[in-house]
Image (spheres, helix red, strand yellow):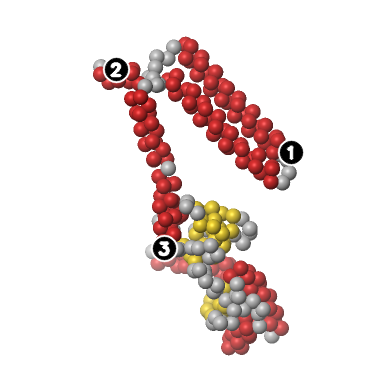
């Protein structure tokens, strides 16, 4: 009985007039949202330049403002606007917001940790999950990464807790690049290794105070060569790899060295299929 009286003091008596008022408010909210969204989109599509994007940015803000206004009108109709009820309502609302924003708060805490541990800084080339690019800005909640495709990706600091961060240059100017060559097994390996090293030495993008390493790895389909070297500037990494690849292929082709007959991906798939069949045969 006391519980019923407690809830009765919390909520107002909903009569027919209150229901009509609620219906009118909700209907007006729906109409206002539809009109504002379509109207702002209509205006924005007829504008040009920066003004167009500013108008589009008003769309979610306008919708949020309408919803907050509607909530401010509806709450006093349903709930008795006493101090005790408002404290109870705000407490429940705060608890709900706390659960909803736990990831946001976790990202803020991770942002503080990132400012101390420095896993990335502006100018670093990092990979977080499938996102690779240059760090443009480190904010309180997110790190802004510009990809090689010129996309700006906002990655929350929350990823620090359970994902690896690959930092290619770690606050410096030295970033190792790898150019791969897949060659037919019938070739003079010593000559190829020297030729690929000379290709790296004659590149206009080479950073000379860092080592050049040519790695050879034998595969079922042939030999996989990798030139590991450093460009002058980390932002030149793709130009550097392209230069090494084009000139390396030209040198090898002129010497009559053939590429691998079976592509590495196909060879890998074939090897996995054979390995699976072998495992099933032994089971």
Rendered image quadrant of residue 62: top right
Rendered image quadrant of residue 208: bottom right
Q: Is residue 244 visible?
A: no
Which residue is drawn at the image coordinates 29% and 17% (left, top)? 5
Looking at the image, which residue sits at the far top?
Answer: 16
Which residue is drawn at the image coordinates 60% and 75% (left, top)? 231
Residue 3 x, y percent position in the rendering: 27, 21
Residue located beneath label 3 in the image: 117
Query: Answer yes or no: do the residues labelled 1 and 3 have beta carbons within 8 Å?
Result: no
Which residue is drawn at the image coordinates 48% and 26% (left, top)? 72
Say few, some or many: other residues with alpha carbon within 10 Å of mark 3 (under 14 / 14 to 19 / 20 or more).
Answer: few
- CA–CA distance in space, label 1 to label 2: 57 Å
Which residue is drawn at the image coordinates 43% and 51% (left, top)? 108
Say few, some or many: other residues with alpha carbon within 10 Å of mark 2 (under 14 / 14 to 19 / 20 or more).
Answer: few
Tell which of 90 and 133 is nearer to you: 90
In the rendered structure, the answer to whether residue 91 lies left or right of residue 197 reads left
Tell which of 101 and 192 is nearer to you: 101
Tell which of 226 and 120 is nearer to you: 120
Q: Which mark is residue 5?
A: 2
Q: Is residue 34 visible?
A: yes
Q: Secondary structure at mark 2?
A: helix
Q: Which mark is residue 46?
A: 1
């Amino acid at each position: 009985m006391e519980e019923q009286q407690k809830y009765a003091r919390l909520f107002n008596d909903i009569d027919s007039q209150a229901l009509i008022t609620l219906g009118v408010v909700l209907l007006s909210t729906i109409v206002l949202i539809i009109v504002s969204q379509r109207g702002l989109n209509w205006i924005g599509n007829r504008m040009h330049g920066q003004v167009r994007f500013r108008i589009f940015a008003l769309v979610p803000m306008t919708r949020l403002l309408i919803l907050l206004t509607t909530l401010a009108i509806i709450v006093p109709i349903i709930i008795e606007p006493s101090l005790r009820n408002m404290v109870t309502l705000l407490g429940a609302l705060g608890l709900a917001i706390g659960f909803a924003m736990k990831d946001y708060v976790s990202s803020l805490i991770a942002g503080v940790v990132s400012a101390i541990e420095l896993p990335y800084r502006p100018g670093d080339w990092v990979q977080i999950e499938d996102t690779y690019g240059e760090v443009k800005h480190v904010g309180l909640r997110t790190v802004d990464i510009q990809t090689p495709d010129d996309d700006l990706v906002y990655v929350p600091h929350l990823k620090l807790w359970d994902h690896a961060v690959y930092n290619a240059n770690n606050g410096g100017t030295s970033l190792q690049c790898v150019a791969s060559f897949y060659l037919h097994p019938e070739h003079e390996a010593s000559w190829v290794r020297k030729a690929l090293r000379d290709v790296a030495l004659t590149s206009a993008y080479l950073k000379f105070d860092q080592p050049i390493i040519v790695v050879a790895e034998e595969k079922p389909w042939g030999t996989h060569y990798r030139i590991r070297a450093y460009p002058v500037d980390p932002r030149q990494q793709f130009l550097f790899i392209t230069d090494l690849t084009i000139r390396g292929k030209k040198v090898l082709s002129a010497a009559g060295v053939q590429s691998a007959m079976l592509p590495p991906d196909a060879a890998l798939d074939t090897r996995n299929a054979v390995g699976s069949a072998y495992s099933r045969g032994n089971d």
